[in-house]
C-alpha cells in the first residue's frame, strides 16, 4: 500500500475491550491527521474473523483483555498475516514484557498515557512495512530474474562466459563447460581464460593476451564479433568458433565482458563443401572452369610481371563419346578419372590442370616458356593418354588432341587465350588426332569466317538463298535417267555458290540442319511430282539425311511420309542416303526411323561405301537397297589394279546380298567401261552431268537418257 497520508484512508483494527480507550485511540489518530476506518474487537474469535474479512492495514492491540491478550494477537497476526503490522497500545508494562512483545513481532508499543506519539508511530510502522514489502518484491523480482538468467544460461545452446578486466573467468554456463571439454565450471571460473582457450593459433603457435582480440576489446570496453577464431579444448584439440563479446559497464567504467561463442565446425565443413562444389570437378577432383579461370588470371599477371611467356594447353580425348555410347557413362567416368590422374602425372606441382567440361581438360604450364619444354610436356601427355585404359573388365584405347596457345604471343586476355587454345585443339583433331597443334593467326581468321558464315546461314532459308540442285543417276544397262540425287547449295549474296562441305557442318552445329534437310526434302518431292507426271513415272529422288537428324527423335520420318501422301507420291519415289557411320549407331532412334521409312516403301542407299567401317553385318541388319561406291575407288581404278579389284569385289558382294550398286564420281569413258564390265548397276558423275538447277535437270529428263 501507499505510505499513509491525509488522503489515504486506512483500515485500522482495534483490539480493545474498553470502548472509552478505543475512542481515545481514534481521537489521537484523527488529531494526528490520519484518515481511517476503524473496527473494534475484543475476543480471539472476533480478532481472527476481522483479520480475514476486514483486512486491516494495521492492528492496534491492548496488551491485556479479559479473555485474550496482545501477545497472542501478535502471534496470530504474524503467523497468518505476516504483512499486517501490530502495535501494542496499553497501560504500563514491564521492560521484559515489552522486549518479549517485540520479539514476538510487535512493531512498537505505545503507552495509553502517551497517545500523542501514536500517529507518528503508526505512520512510521506503515512506512517501514511498505518499505519492507517493496524490498521483498524487489528481492523476489531479483531472485526470479536471476533464476531466469540462470535458466537461460543453463539451457542456452551457445557457450557463454564472463571475464573480468584481468582476463579471469567470472562465470560460465554448462554449454561452455561442455564445448570446451571440461567437467565442471570451477575448472574455468577464476582461471585466466586466454591461457586456457585462446592462447594458440590454428597452427599451434602461441600468442600473448595482448594480441588476443577479445582481451583487447575488453580493455577498450568495446563490442567485438569474430567468425574465424580458433578455440582450444581441455584435451588439446581445437575447433573453429564464432564469438561475440559485449562489455560490462559500471559507473561508466568497463569491468569486464560477457562472451558468447559457437562451435562452427559443421558450418565450416558445409562452407568448404559448397566452395569445393563451386570450384572443383566432383568426378576427378580437379579444379573446374570457374577456378581455372581464376588461376589463369593469376598466371597471366605473373607472366606479365616476369616478362615471360605462358603456355595454355587445351586437351580433348579422342573417341571418348564412343566409350560412353558403347560401354556406358559409368565406364566413361572411370576413364575420365584415370585420364585426369595421367595428366597430373605429366606435370609439375606448380602447374595447373582442370577439367573444363566433358572430356575437355586444360593445363597451365607455369614455368615452361620455351618450345622444347612445352613440346616435351605435350608429347608426354599424348604418350600417357594413348596407353590402354583398364576399365574394370574392359580395355579401352583412346588418344588426345592438344591445342597450345601462348601468352602474350597469341592473346593477352583470358577469354581469347582459352578460345585460341581450343581452336588449336580442333586443328589437331582435323589433322588426324593424337597430336598437338599450336595456335596460328590463320586459325583465328578461319574461326571468324566460320562465325560470320554461321550468322549468315541463319538468314539463308528466309532469304531464299538455299537452293536444291539435281545430279542424274544413270542406269548403265539402258542409259536412262530413272534416279537423281538432290544436293543442297547455298547461293551466298557476296561469296556466290558455297560448297555444302563448308556450310553443312555449321548447320549441324547450330541445329539449322533440321530446317535445311526438311526444306530440301519438300522441295525435291515437289519437283519429283512434277517430273514423274511429265517425263518418267518411275523417277526416284535420293535425299541426303544428316546423321544428327536420326538422333533428334520425334516423328520426322512420319512427317515425311505424311507429306508424300499429301503429294500423292508413293514411297518408292524417295530414297534416303545415309552413311556407314550412321549404321554403326544402332540406337532405337536410328533403327526405328529406318524401319518406318522402309515399311512405307522408301528405299535406303548407303553413301560413300568403303570409306568407313564397312561392316557387312549392318548391310544385312538394315536391309539396304543401294550401295554407292565412293569416288576414291574410282579415281585410280584405270591405273591401279587393286582399286579395280576392290570395286569389282564390292559389286559382286552387293549383288550376292540383293543390293544394287551406284558408282559415284564417274568422270571418264574408261571408268564407265570398267564399271559396266564389272556389272555395276548405276553411275553418277561429271561424265554425265554435274549437279544442276531444276530447270537444267528437266532438260536432261526430256531426253530420257544419257
Image (spheres, helix red, strand yellow):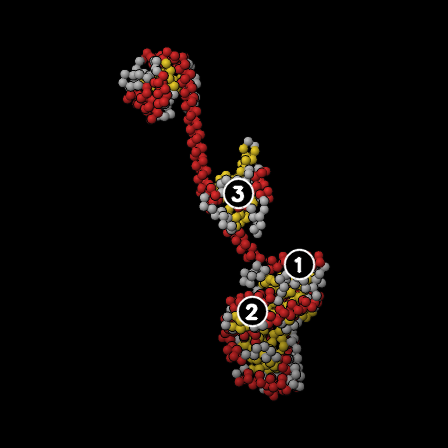
- CB within 8 Å, label 1 to label 2: no
> Where does the N terminus fall, quadrant-wise?
top left
> Where does the C terminus fall, quadrant-wise?
bottom right
Rendered residue at 68%/67% (across/down): 373
Separation (CA) of disc 3 from disc 1: 45 Å
Q: Residues within 10 Å of mark 2 (few under 14, many from 20)?
A: some
Image x and y of residue 256, in percent: 54, 37
Separation (CA) of disc 2 from disc 3: 62 Å
The local secondary structure at tag 2 comes to helix
Instruction: State the residue position of label 3.
Output: 193
The local secondary structure at tag 3 comes to helix
Q: Which of the two residues, 178 or 417, is positioned nearer the viewer here?
A: 178
Rendered residue at 56%/67% (across/down): 338
Instruction: State the residue position of label 2.
Output: 321
State the image quarter where residue 76 is shown: top left
Q: Residues within 10 Å of mark 3 (few under 14, many from 20)?
A: many
Residue reaching furthest to the left? 67
Separation (CA) of disc 1 from disc 2: 32 Å
**Label 1 vs 2, first from the N-terminus:** 1
Instruction: State the residue position of label 1.
Output: 299
State the image quarter where residue 132 is shown: top left
Image x and y of residue 644, in percent: 62, 85
State the image quarter where residue 374 is shown: bottom right
Which dot, 1 or 2, sits closer to the camera? 1
Image x and y of residue 518, in percent: 57, 69
- Residue 519 visible from this viewpoint: no
Amino acid at each position: 500500500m501507499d505510505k499513509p497520508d491525509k488522503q489515504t484512508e486506512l483500515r485500522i483494527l482495534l483490539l480493545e475491550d474498553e470502548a472509552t480507550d478505543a475512542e481515545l485511540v481514534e481521537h489521537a489518530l484523527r488529531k494526528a491527521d490520519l484518515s481511517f476506518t476503524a473496527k473494534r474487537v475484543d475476543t480471539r474469535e472476533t480478532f481472527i474473523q476481522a483479520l480475514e474479512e476486514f483486512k486491516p492495514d494495521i492492528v492496534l492491540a491492548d496488551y491485556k483483555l479479559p479473555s485474550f491478550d496482545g501477545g497472542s494477537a501478535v502471534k496470530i497476526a504474524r503467523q497468518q498475516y505476516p504483512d499486517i503490522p501490530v502495535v501494542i497500545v496499553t497501560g504500563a508494562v514491564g521492560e521484559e514484557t515489552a522486549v518479549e512483545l517485540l520479539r514476538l513481532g510487535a512493531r512498537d508499543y505505545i503507552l495509553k498515557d502517551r497517545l500523542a506519539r501514536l500517529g507518528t508511530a503508526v505512520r512510521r510502522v506503515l512506512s517501514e512495512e511498505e518499505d519492507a514489502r517493496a524490498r521483498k518484491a524487489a528481492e523476489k523480482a531479483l531472485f526470479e530474474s536471476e533464476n531466469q538468467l540462470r535458466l537461460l544460461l543453463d539451457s542456452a545452446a551457445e557457450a557463454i562466459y564472463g571475464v573480468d578486466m584481468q582476463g579471469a573467468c567470472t562465470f560460465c554456463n554448462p554449454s561452455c563447460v561442455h564445448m570446451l571439454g571440461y567437467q565442471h565450471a570451477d575448472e574455468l571460473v577464476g582461471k585466466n581464460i586466454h591461457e586456457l582457450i585462446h592462447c594458440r593459433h590454428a597452427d599451434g603457435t602461441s600468442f600473448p593476451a595482448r594480441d588476443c582480440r577479445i582481451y583487447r576489446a575488453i580493455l577498450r570496453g568495446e563490442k567485438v564479433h569474430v567468425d574465424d577464431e580458433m578455440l582450444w579444448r581441455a584435451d588439446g584439440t581445437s575447433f573453429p568458433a564464432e564469438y561475440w563479446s559485449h562489455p560490462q559497464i559500471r559507473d561508466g567504467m568497463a569491468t569486464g565482458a560477457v562472451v558468447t561463442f559457437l562451435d562452427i565446425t559443421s558450418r565450416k565443413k558445409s562452407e568448404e563443401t559448397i566452395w569445393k562444389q563451386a570450384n572443383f570437378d566432383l568426378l576427378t577432383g580437379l579444379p573446374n572452369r570457374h577456378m581455372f579461370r581464376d588461376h589463369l588470371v593469376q598466371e597471366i599477371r605473373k607472366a606479365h610481371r616476369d616478362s615471360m611467356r605462358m603456355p595454355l594447353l587445351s586437351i580433348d580425348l579422342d573417341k571418348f563419346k564412343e566409350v560412353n555410347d558403347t560401354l556406358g557413362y559409368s565406364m566413361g567416368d572411370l576413364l575420365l578419372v584415370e585420364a585426369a590422374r595421367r595428366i597430373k602425372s605429366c606435370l609439375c606441382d606448380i602447374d595447373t590442370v582442370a577439367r573444363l567440361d566433358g572430356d575437355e581438360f586444360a593445363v597451365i604450364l607455369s614455368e615452361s616458356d620455351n618450345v622444347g619444354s612445352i613440346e616435351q610436356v605435350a608429347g608426354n601427355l599424348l604418350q600417357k593418354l594413348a596407353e590402354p585404359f583398364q576399365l574394370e573388365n574392359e580395355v579401352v584405347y583412346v588418344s588426345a588432341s592438344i591445342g597450345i596457345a601462348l601468352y602474350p604471343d597469341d592473346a593477352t586476355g583470358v577469354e581469347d587465350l582459352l578460345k585460341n587454345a581450343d581452336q588449336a585443339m580442333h586443328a589437331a583433331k582435323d589433322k588426324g588426332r593424337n597430336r598437338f597443334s599450336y595456335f596460328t593467326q590463320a586459325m583465328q581468321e578461319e574461326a571468324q569466317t566460320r562465325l560470320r558464315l554461321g550468322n549468315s546461314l541463319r538468314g539463308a532459308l528466309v532469304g531464299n538463298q538455299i537452293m536444291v540442285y539435281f545430279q542424274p543417276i544413270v542406269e548403265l544397262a539402258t542409259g536412262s535417267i530413272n534416279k537423281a540425287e538432290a544436293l543442297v547449295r547455298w547461293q551466298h549474296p557476296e561469296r556466290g555458290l558455297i560448297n555444302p562441305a563448308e556450310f553443312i557442318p555449321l548447320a549441324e552445329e547450330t541445329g539449322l540442319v533440321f530446317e535445311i534437310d526438311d526444306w530440301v526434302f519438300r522441295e525435291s518431292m515437289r519437283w519429283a511430282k512434277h517430273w514423274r507426271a511429265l517425263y518418267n513415272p518411275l523417277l526416284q529422288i535420293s535425299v541426303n539425311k544428316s546423321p544428327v537428324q536420326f538422333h533428334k527423335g520425334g516423328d520426322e520420318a512420319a512427317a515425311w511420309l505424311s507429306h508424300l501422301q499429301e503429294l500423292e507420291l508413293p514411297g518408292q519415289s524417295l530414297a534416303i542416303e545415309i552413311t556407314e557411320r550412321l549404321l554403326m549407331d544402332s540406337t532405337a532412334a536410328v533403327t526405328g526411323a529406318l524401319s518406318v521409312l522402309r515399311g512405307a516403301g522408301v528405299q535406303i542407299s548407303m553413301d560413300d561405301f568403303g570409306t568407313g567401317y564397312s561392316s557387312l553385318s549392318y548391310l544385312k541388319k538394315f536391309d539396304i537397297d543401294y550401295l554407292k561406291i565412293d569416288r576414291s575407288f574410282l579415281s585410280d581404278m584405270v591405273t591401279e589394279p587393286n582399286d579395280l579389284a576392290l570395286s569389282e569385289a564390292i559389286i559382286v558382294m552387293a549383288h550376292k546380298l540383293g543390293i544394287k550398286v551406284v558408282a559415284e564420281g564417274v568422270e571418264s569413258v574408261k571408268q564407265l567401261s570398267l564399271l559396266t564390265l564389272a556389272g555395276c548397276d548405276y553411275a553418277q558423275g561429271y561424265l554425265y552431268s554435274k549437279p544442276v538447277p531444276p530447270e537444267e535437270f528437266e532438260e536432261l529428263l526430256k531426253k530420257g537418257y544419257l
